[in-house]
């Protein structure tokens, strides 16, 4: 999907916590973070803010480090570069870093996970690199925290697979969607957002809840519903995982398309 720079239409802003120099704007389906301050102080808050936006499944997340100043700090750069691990594991939502400072830019691009990020000196250059990692199609649905939502999730995913010419994956994708939603209904008991994306040769399924309890689904050898359900997910998927962010978590799974 070609990501075009959208025209801002009343972007929403979140007020950062006291002492955190990170502002967040929404430009269409893209999240833009403006970061200000010394690198060692802002690396942690910037990373947290990027992930908080990322779990909402935007088209892309861009972090503007133009107003970030030295000193160049290796732990801080490593923390920012680790954002690339999310892109590597869960494709379709590219993360871009606008970084005019050459030393910081070279430190980020030289880090192991930095190669999965779109890092460039200017905003225009970052925008140009985002399309390569973007999902070609994404659909979303809001589901109630009740058992019948598992059926709604199956129908929703089946329709997406049909629309995208992935009918051969309907059985696996609908089973995975059903298990992830059932898990969220049992554990989170909050309204849910399901996203399904076509990312090249992969399908990405994610279920976002708003439960602040840090419970993590695990594949276990037991006869309980959660254990068996996650065994199904692990058997059918190339990879799956959990990402915690402010106000909840995202459970995701990747299948071949």
Image: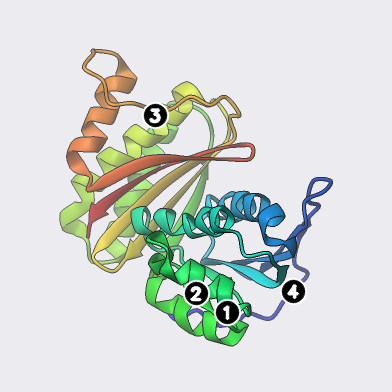
Mark 3 or 1: in front is 1
- Where, quadrant-wise, is the C terminus in this rendering? bottom left
- Of the image marks 3 and 1, the number of the one nearer the N terminus: 1
Give the residue number, with chain letter if any, for mark 4: 9
Give the residue number, with chain letter if any, for mark 3: 182
Give me the C-alpha separation between circle 4 and circle 1: 33 Å
Give the residue number, with chain letter if any, for mark 1: 102
At horizontal 39% and vertical 68% (from top left) the residue drawn is 115
- Of the image marks 2 and 3, the number of the one nearer the N terminus: 2
Whether residue 1 can be seen here: no
Mark 4 or 1: in front is 1
- Please say if the residues under marks 4 and 3 sit with CB atoms less than 8 Å apart: no
Report the side of 129 relative to 89 (left or right). right
Give the residue number, with chain letter if any, for mark 2: 106
Give me the C-alpha separation between circle 2 and circle 3: 44 Å
Report the side of 48 relative to 146 (left or right). right
In this view, the residue in front, 7 or 109, is 109
x, y (%) of residue 218? 33, 26
Give me the C-alpha separation between circle 2 and circle 4: 34 Å
Which corner quadrant of the image does residue 131 belong to?
bottom left
Q: Secondary structure at mark 3?
A: helix
Mark 2 or 4: in front is 2
Q: Secondary structure at mark 4?
A: loop
Give me the C-alpha separation between circle 4 and circle 3: 36 Å
x, y (%) of residue 221? 21, 17
Q: Secondary structure at mark 2?
A: helix
x, y (%) of residue 34? 72, 66
Give me the C-alpha separation between circle 3 and circle 1: 47 Å
Which corner quadrant of the image does residue 12 belong to?
bottom right
């Amino acid at each position: 999907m070609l990501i075009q720079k959208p025209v801002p239409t009343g972007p929403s802003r979140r007020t950062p916590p006291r002492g955190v120099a990170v502002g967040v704007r929404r430009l269409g389906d893209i999240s833009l973070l403006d970061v200000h301050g010394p690198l060692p102080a802002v690396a942690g808050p910037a990373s947290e803010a990027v992930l908080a936006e990322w779990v909402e499944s935007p088209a892309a997340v861009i972090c503007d480090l133009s107003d970030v100043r030295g000193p160049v700090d290796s732990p801080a750069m490593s923390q920012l570069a680790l954002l690339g691990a999310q892109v590597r594991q869960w494709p379709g939502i590219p993360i871009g870093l606008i970084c005019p400072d050459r030393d910081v830019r070279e430190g980020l691009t030289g880090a192991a996970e930095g190669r999965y990020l779109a890092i460039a000196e200017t905003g225009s250059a970052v925008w140009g690199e985002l399309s390569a990692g973007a999902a070609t199609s994404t659909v979303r649905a809001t589901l109630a925290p009740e058992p019948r939502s598992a059926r709604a999730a199956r129908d929703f995913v089946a329709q997406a697979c049909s629309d995208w010419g992935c009918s051969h994956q309907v059985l696996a994708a609908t089973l995975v969607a059903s298990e992830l939603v059932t898990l969220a209904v049992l554990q989170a008991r909050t309204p849910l957002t399901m996203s399904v994306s076509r990312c090249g040769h992969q399908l990405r399924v994610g279920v976002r809840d708003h439960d602040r309890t840090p419970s993590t689904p695990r594949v276990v050898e037991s006869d309980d519903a959660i254990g068996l359900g996650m065994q199904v997910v692990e058997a059918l998927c190339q990879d799956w995982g959990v990402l915690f962010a402010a106000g909840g978590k995202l459970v995701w799974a990747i299948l071949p398309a």
